């Protein structure tokens, strides 16, 4: 009985850890602020009375490479921010000033120097009622 429970717990925990899409990015979140290289008030959607959002990524083992945050709205690239990690753990963030009419889904791609998309995250910018 104990062996079955142990096996079940191992299977469940391995699924949890296998969900993260990229082993060189340990965290990727949208936030309302970044303080001391740490995201504050993590969000997945915001109302259009908020005028700025941050995208934070914790990069692992990408020292010496070029990493880019590409911001998209309605399929159009709205911004691109380039980073050059100088350590094996490098915390970076970019931000986007938002116009109140740009409601809907936004996307940020994390791209390496070979233009390979490492990760994609989305958030919703909702009309404030």
Image (cartoon, rainbow, N blue to C red):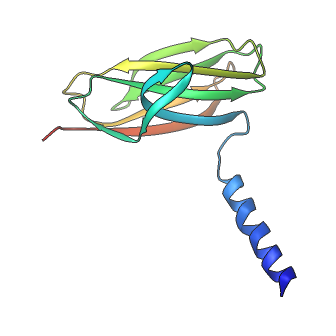
Q: Is residue 15 left or right of residue 99?
A: right
Q: Nearer the viewer, residue 68 or 116?
A: 68
Q: Is residue 89 left or right of residue 19?
A: right
Q: Nearer the viewer, residue 105 or 9?
A: 9
List x then y, in percent, for residue 117: 61, 31
Quadrant of image for the C terminus: top left
List x then y, in percent, for residue 95: 43, 19
Q: Is residue 105 left or right of residue 61?
A: left
Q: Is residue 43 above or below residue 92?
A: below
Instruction: Write the residue at 63% across / 22% down.
Output: 91
Q: Is residue 81 above or below residue 25?
A: above
List x then y, in percent, for residue 101: 19, 27
Instruction: Write the residue at 82% across / 82% down.
Output: 4
Q: Residue furthest bottom?
A: 1
| Quadrant housing residue 118 | top right
Instruction: Write the residue at 39% across / 39% down.
Output: 123
| Quadrant housing residue 13 | bottom right
Task: Please count the marks in the image.
Answer: 0
List x then y, in percent, for residue 39: 50, 29
Q: Residue furthest left?
A: 129
Quadrant of image for the N terminus: bottom right
Q: Residue furthest front?
A: 36
């Amino acid at each position: 009985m104990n062996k079955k429970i142990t096996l079940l717990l191992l299977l469940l925990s391995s699924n949890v850890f296998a969900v993260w899409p990229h082993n060189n990015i340990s965290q990727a979140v949208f936030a309302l602020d970044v303080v001391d290289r740490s995201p504050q008030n993590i969000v997945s959607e915001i109302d259009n009375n908020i005028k700025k959002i941050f995208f934070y990524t914790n990069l692992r083992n990408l020292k010496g490479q070029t990493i880019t945050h590409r911001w998209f709205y309605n399929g159009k690239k709205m911004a691109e921010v380039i980073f050059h990690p100088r350590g094996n753990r490098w915390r970076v963030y970019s931000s986007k000033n938002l116009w109140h009419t740009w409601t809907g889904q936004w996307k940020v791609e994390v791209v390496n120097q070979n233009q390979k998309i490492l990760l994609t995250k989305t958030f919703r910018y909702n009309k404030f009622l």
